[in-house]
Image (spheres, rainbow, N blue to C red):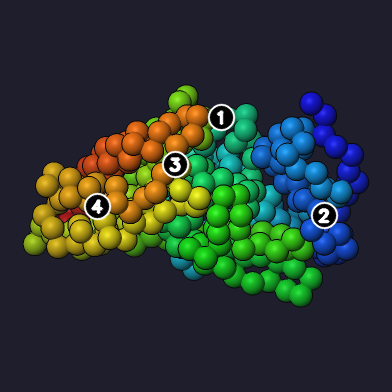
Amino acid sequence: MKPPRFDYYDPRTLQEALEILDAHQGDGKVLAGGQSLMPLLNMRLARPKVVVDINRIQALSYIRPMESGVAIGANARQRALQQENLIAERLPLLREAAYYIAHPQIRSRGTICGSLAHADPAAELPALAMALDAELVATGLRGARTIPSDSFFLSFFTTDLQPNEILTEVRFPAPPKDMAWSILEVSRRHGDFALVGIVAGLAVDQERQAVTDARLIYFGVGPTPIRVKQAERALIGQRPAEAAWDAAARVAGQGIDPSNDIHATEEYRRAVAATLTKRALRAALGKLKDLNASTGSA
């Protein structure tokens, strides 16, 4: 199919882009990587009057260190998650997660901020943003505002971004050094959106052999990424072993509300979520042991 008619702009500055968006309140769409927007246009599921292409705004093409973590500009591509040494050093979980994000051709054009702004609940990056307490910077003509990730995602493909704002930056803080992470997902084919996915974080007091912190974020099982705090609490103080993983999996199943669709039933998604919970926690514990061995911790 062909997209509906629209006016195309390719501004050179953020100010110019914002002025165009502001002049077409609610009728404009921002084009960065285009990996989500172009299919929507071609299928006529999106019918903006104006498309604002921000690819010529060089000031938005960066990945740079913060005091703690990494700041990523709106035009940074998903392939950078695998190629940038800064990501590998400070946020190895993002590098690991890139394996699950679509295919190399898509990652070469798709942007990290674009995926966050699109807010597909089955996508990896929104779940990673919530797991790592990322902050998202929305910029409009009146200035920029910083939105915590747990307030940014509102519902299916819906965020706190206003029609005249651009998601100009995402800031990933460095995760706690005593936490290990894993990401797993099940999809119909590699590169597809997840039927069910999980980002798990785990910290263990090695001397007491007790879980001291946990983070469990699910995707593909609700309108947004879902953090199941009651399952996290079920792990705290427990011995890091199968009994604890089983308990967390049971509680997690009560904390998600997956839907039936043409790809999977609610029951299937709950069963997969339970299985992935246990596998992800085992994987995180394994990484934690490797980390402690490398640092000589007890």
Estimate the spatial distance between the alpha carbons at disc 4 and disc 1, rounded to whole Å.
33 Å
Q: Contact, CB < 8 Å: mark 4 with mark 1? A: no
> Disc 3 residue type?
Ser
Q: Residue 281 appears at what percent x and percent y?
A: 25, 46
Q: Which residue is mark 2?
A: 27
What residue sits right under mark 4 in the picture? 251
**Image-quadrant location for residue 269:** top left
Q: Are marks 4 and 2 in contact (CB under 8 Å)?
A: no
Mark before the other along the chain sequence, 3 or 1: 1
Q: Position of residue 2 (x, y in %)?
A: 82, 29
Relative placement, left or right, of 137 versus 291 is right
Alpha-carbon distance for marks 3 and 4?
A: 18 Å
Residue 236 drawn at (x, y percent):
19, 62
Q: Work out which residue is located at the far left of the displayed protein and give it.
A: 208
Residue that carries the numbered disc 1 in the rendered image: 103
Secondary structure of residue under mark 4: helix
* Viewport quadrant of the N terminus: top right
What residue appears at the point 51 percent right and 62 percent down from the top-left corner? 149
- The reply to whether the C-beta atoms of the residues labelled 2 and 3 are less than 8 Å apart is no
